[in-house]
Image (spheres, rainbow, N blue to C red):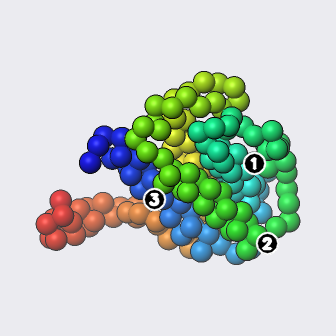
Amino acid sequence: MTTGTAFLQSIIKRLLYYKELADKTFLTLEENNFHYQYNEESNSIAIIIQHIAGNMISRWTDFLTSDGEKEWRNRDKEFEKKLLTKEEIIDLWEKGWHCCMSSLQSLTEADLLAIIYIRGEKLIALEAINRQLAHYPYHVGQIIYIAKMIKNSKWQSLSIPKNGSEQFNDFLKKDNMF
């Protein structure tokens, strides 16, 4: 396997991991939870999803051949409150991820050094991919944090729970995974 192919596979795996964390979070939430805002300056989970989906569809549509900030994208509208149902919010989320993953899966090692543009900024494709790898987990973290505030003591950890590291490591040692 070439370095470029390994990189692309690693990026896809990492991004899908963060998608999975958010997907698991969504399963714990009621419809109204998606619209909870701590204050007027804060974003709800629904607004964050609107933004991520808008970003993904803009950035990954014609990734190698057109500026990642499409003329048809209205970023400011992504941050407006919309009374979408949970199903509509999840559909938007999935549409963004489908666009992202389809584009990434179509790339080859040779594409990684292609010149692309985002808002007129010249980047190699590899830089643009790394940029998105930093952007999406940032917002997934926000989604999880908001959900933890909403669920409070009912929150179920998505990874190793607080004070559970020793038990987790013992489990790995017992199964020769560590």
Instruction: Indicate the amino acid at tag 3.
Output: Tyr
Judged left or right of residue 76, residue 56 is left
Q: Quadrant of residue 152?
A: bottom right
For the residue labelled by badge 2, is the local secondary structure a helix, a strand or a loop?
loop
Which callout, 3 or 2, points at the residue further toward the start of the chain? Answer: 3
Which badge, 1 or 3, is on the more N-terminal residue? Answer: 3
Answer above or below: position of 87 versus 123. Answer: below
**Residue 37 image offset from top left, x and y in percent:** 76, 56
Residue 17: mark: 3
Q: Gap in Å between the C-alphas at discs 1 and 2?
A: 20 Å
- 95 or 142, which lies in front? 95
Nearest to the eye among marks 1 and 2: give it.
2
- Residue 138 in percent (x, y) is at 57, 45
Rendered position, 77 above or below 117: below
Location of mark 1 (residue)? 42
Q: Amino acid at mark 2?
A: Thr
Q: CA distance from mark 3 to mark 2?
A: 25 Å
| Label number found at residue 85 | 2
